[in-house]
Amino acid sequence: MAEFVHLVVVKFKEEVVVEDIIKGLEKLVSQVDTVKSFVWGKDIESMEMLRQGFTHALMMTFGSKDDFDAFQTHPNHLEYTATFSAAIEKIVLLDFPAVVVKPPTA
Amino acid sequence: MAEFVHLVVVKFKEEVVVEDIIKGLEKLVSQVDTVKSFVWGKDIESMEMLRQGFTHALMMTFGSKDDFDAFQTHPNHLEYTATFSAAIEKIVLLDFPAVVVKPPTA
């Protein structure tokens, strides 16, 4: 079965301490077993025209769509959503079954 | 060393055959050795307010920033960029060192 990806691209509000948000997410993914992997990053290439003001990407991977649904409705996720939503200036969110063209090699 | 991620979030033009674009990308990543992994997907959750019209995500991973730079300047990449650019209606692009909070498990 295809893995399922929850992808969030954001620009946080200026006053937000991003480290705090990340800490909250680290806690969240440690609490929700169905989160298979969590990787994030801050853009460093600064091709402003192409990043369109967005600065951070957050990617969570799940073993299946069902596992993702379990995350979406998990009480801890719902609780953290309020904190997260208050911190963002803009967001793009995509949820999709991962099509793996070139699998990661060890 | 941290892996480096090249993340592209796009909305393709209406007349574009996405399969052709993907085929081109498959060919490209098979030609450029420094591309460690390539995963893409099409949003299926349709939370329109949150996906903001974007429909596809493309993620390439590299072993290092140097490997990414080699991809960026690879002749085949430069060549394909023209085709890709002509196909997109809008795009957000982020390039970042991956911070792995929860590593993928087998």
Image: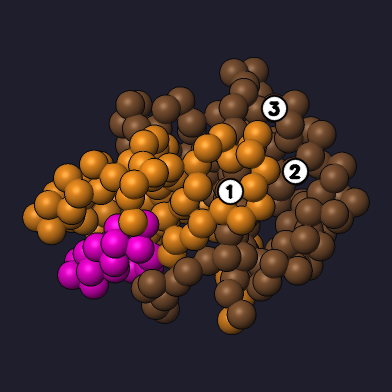
Chain colours: A brown, B orange
Specify the farthest residue to the front: B15
Magenta highlight: main SS: helix
In this view, the residue in front, B48 or A70, is: B48
Residue at position x 85%, y 54% in the image: A73
- Locate residue A46, reporting x and y percent: 34, 31
In the rendered view of the protein, which quadrant contains the N terminus of chain A?
bottom right
Secondary structure beneath disc 2? helix
Residue at position x 9%, y 55% in the image: B75
> Pointer 1: what residue?
A94
In this view, the residue in front, A27 or B82, is: B82
In the rendered view of the protein, which quadrant contains the C terminus of chain A?
bottom left
Whether residue B81 is situated above or below residue A98 in the rendered picture? above
How many numbered discs?
A: 3
Whether pointer 1 and pointer 3 mark residues with C-beta atoms closer than 8 Å, the reply is no
Secondary structure beneath disc 3? helix
> Pointer 3: what residue?
A87
Residue A19 appears in the figure: no
Specify the farthest residue to the top: A15
* 1 or 3: mark nearer the eye: 1
Amino acid under disc 3 = Ala
Rendered image quadrant of residue B67: bottom left
Chain of the residue displaying label 3: A
Which is nearer the N-term, disc 1 or disc 3? Answer: 3
Chain of the residue displaying label 1: A
- Locate residue B13, reporting x and y percent: 36, 42
Residue at position x 73%, y 57% in the image: A29
> Pointer 2: what residue?
A24
Amino acid under disc 1 = Leu
What segment is highlighted magenta in the picture?
B18-38
Residue B75 belongs to magenta span: no
